[in-house]
Image: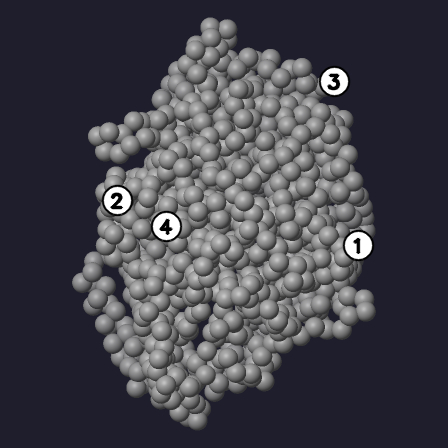
Amino acid sequence: RSGMGAMGNNKNVNVPMLPMALDALCDVMEARVESSRLEKERAAVLSEMTMVNTIEYRVECQILSTLHRENRLAKRFPIGKESLIRSWKTDDVKTWHRTHYRPDNVLLYVVGDVEVEEVERCIEEKFGHITAEKQAEGIKLTELKPEASKLADALVGNKDVVKSHQSWHYPPVKHDWSAGSNAEFVEKFTNTDDSSSAKYDLHLQESYELDEEVNFLKRDELVAKKKIRPHIFRHELLQAFSLHLFAKRPVEPITDLRSFRRSLARRVALAALQIRLNVGGRSDDPAFTFVEFNQLDSAREGCAVCSLDMTSEPHRWKDAICKSVSEIRKLGIYGVTPGEMERYASALMTDAEQLAAQGDRISNGDQLSFLMETVANGHTFMSPEQSYYTTVKALSTLTLEEVNEAARDMCSHITCINANEPAQDGVLIVTACSPKDAQPGDEGYCDEDSLLDTIYEACQLEIEPEEDVVVPRTLVPEEVLKKAVELNPPSWENGQFTDGTPNTPADKLTRPFTLRRLSNGIRVGVGRNPAESQRGHLRIIAPGGRDAEKRLGFKLGSMAVGSRTMQEGGAFGPWTREQVELFCVDHLLMVEINCNEESLTIDFVFPTSNVGNVGFGNDVQLGITGTEAVLQIVREIIVGFHWEEDALGRSKQSYRSAHESLQKNLEGKSTETIMEAMTDRDQRFLSLDVDTVNAVTLDDAKKAIMSQLLPPDLELVVAGDFDTQEVLDMILKYIGTIPADANSEFKVEGQATGEVKDFGSVPDLQLPGKFLELELPDSDPRAVSYVAGSAPNTWGTLADGTTVAQRVMAADKKQSDYDKRRRSHPLFANIALSLLSEIINRRLFSTVRERRQLTYDANFSLTGFERLAGGWFLVTVTASKEKAQAALEACKETLHALRTTNPVTADNLESAKRVVMNRHDQELRTSNYWASLMSGIQEESVPLKGPLSVTDYHAVVEAITAKDLQLTLECLGLDDKELYTAIGRTVQPEGSAPVDDVVATAPMQGMRRGGALMN
């Protein structure tokens, strides 16, 4: 399948792009397999195999191999076998290509602003000469033709093959269906054929020379007639226990209102269960650290996969299984409550409404992906508007009984295990992943019998029906707000900037953003972005972050742990955490709270339309808008947040797990090692260890975070599809009435408010640089190399306080007055560093991958601090253990050549400009990007960031010269004596031999499961 997005004209040169795009695809169809190119791609694929072979990747492979044990998907992953990759010759590749890349096996999708007749004419012109017969002439290994014929006969002749009997887009596989499958569809795939095609090993169930060694467990039943397919994967890199429990069902095509209603009923049930697990499951002492339940149609696998994915601490694995399985049984037996039905039906309605409002502003890429998946699964393709009206019609008559019937079917693979329930046809599939160091007798030890017994026992526990929770329609009653206005009358003040922009008026709307300050000191930025219909993004920025721990004397880790505690909590005023979280669910609010080195940020994604509505059509009762709901949350975070011990406990557990995982992650631990050396172990820039996390008390966390939530220090920016004046009025009412001295009791000695913070700089590098080596026990060979050194921050300030602009101008003795003006622009260094990063990444790709064939990918990045002076660059390259040193040297040589023998060219510059400007223009479609542009725009601690950084973006990019970039490059610490380099390698665990039972192949795309409302 090939897909193309927007195929109009190039806006810069007015050249039709569709013919050029079709030419590129035609080249793919007629690819020449040259020896030199084959060797380059062979090296790239082998490097990619090493790069992706993380522990998460290996877990995914174990899961998929168990899930699809009955078919070829368990043995056929996209990257393939290393031994074969190393041995293939040009005839092998060309034969494979010509066998499959032929017109009768290709689907071409074109999505965009195009004329249908012109597209058809162009396709005929470009592809008309390619025929299956012509492609067959390129098949060099003729002895494979009889095998291909047998494969084709088996594919068509076997009734259980989903490819030939449901969708030609599916893989040529059969599936062992689980309980809850639609009997009508299961019957279609019952194979009674005894012909030679049925005897052909289409599903690769026989043993083959290159098969991976897999230790199958002995039991295939929990109890008599209740089938299970279990697998346990143990590895020294695993820190947590995880359970992955599956049912496979036929995809049910959505082709009429009846099937559409059933799909909506399933989504309502899924949403209810996921929220129960996430909200109710996060008790004072939750058994699991992550849990997700979903059912999604997968065209790549040719089935619908119903999945439970759960992780827990190793010693809590039994409790976690019991809790998650009990919730699934509760849904399957008792269904959803009337309140849940109302809540999630309303959420689906809002989701469809937002999509319809987006209309033709949906990106061609997204539309293409949706079209391809829809067609592949046999669903009826609908425009967003058609989908909206169909959703209205279906939900207006959807009953609680229909939803509960869908819940029963979806959960039946679990509910049927109860001793009082009759056995159902089908197999329950489960993979458990466990740390290798657990021993028999330990709480964390999981073996075949204990795993299966625990699952069975979990299905025998008594369960009670879910009770509806009273969810407030509003968090801030009108009388409370009225009193707040009387006590703290709000008003607007002028916006103020440090980039030379004049103050903006307090009583006028301005473009592209309206920038003001409230009388309590909070800086406010509002931007209308209609590109994301009925959606918005709000961000609160509190300068400080982990730097404030050191600067203001707070306990080490208190900011980081405190921010996560706030994320894990959520009780406000008279409302419990559960009520507030369900309020967020009702209003489709997503909240993320993060603490980095220099700030605390709170991000909200929300709908701008009325949400939490009750009823449909003319009987609908509108709730408040998502914008008003999010401002209520913001107000309560600042003035009414409750700090709870159980939230602190969940926060600490999250950081402990992250640190322990870091110690067994090659990339993570290697990066941490090089950062320790470059920062002289400055804790602001390192991960929190377990002892540090454990030492933080609730009072430590509360004092640290609340000291940052002082109104004169806060900035609130919001962008979205709304009326700017209405949003400003709501901000004035909800945020402007917060007292200016709110949280002042948490202010510490020496803490400045409402002015420039003394952030200082990153630590000076200890010279000369160092070469570091790290070894990590792992059964598989892997390596990663790094080159790092000093760099300016995002706005061009170096650690010693000088700036990129100053250094560039000092180095250019022949600069003109025009050059001085360009380089004095506040945005100059920011743009120069962006362009330079793009050029360096391209150079690394062409040198280290294309020319030297040492890696699949090499990446150059900057730390991106805005307030702290200085920063670092980091080049990351993954390679085989044998080539790690050579890859590192190649990266160093590339950087050196850029300074000397192969400097920045005009072509390099123009290409980078196109990429940077196109990226900027594309990201301007998202409200998240608008929020990032406004963040810090009125903050004194980011002096060069102001309105000019937005209004002059294109002009500054266009004005940059190759000489500017060459001189900017000298602001990086690229001398050999300044470089810190490192290589991280895996080594065989002590006392172990190389293992052969790890599936060293790539996971299939599409197995990542999304949220219940995003089906």
- CA separation in Å, label 2 and label 3: 61 Å
Q: Which class describes the residues within 10 Å of circle 4: few (<14), some (14-19), or many (20+)?
A: many
**Residue 778: percent from the left, percent from the top?**
72, 64
| Quadrant of residue 542 within the rendered picture | top right
| SS label for mark 2 | helix
**Residue 521: percent from the left, percent from the top?**
54, 17
Q: Which residue is mark 3?
A: 749
Q: Is residue 519 left or right of residue 26?
A: right
**Is residue 831 among what the camera can see?**
no
Callout in the foreground (4, 2): 4
Disc on the earlier residue, 1 or 3: 3
Please state which of residues 472 and 228 is positioned toward the viewer in this rendering.
228
Disc on res. 406: 4
Q: Which residue is mark 1?
A: 770
Q: Which class describes the residues within 10 Å of circle 1: few (<14), some (14-19), or many (20+)?
A: some
Badge 1 vs badge 2, beta-carbon distance below 8 Å: no
Please state which of residues 619 and 593 is positioned toward the viewer in this rendering.
619
Disc on the earlier residue, 2 or 3: 2
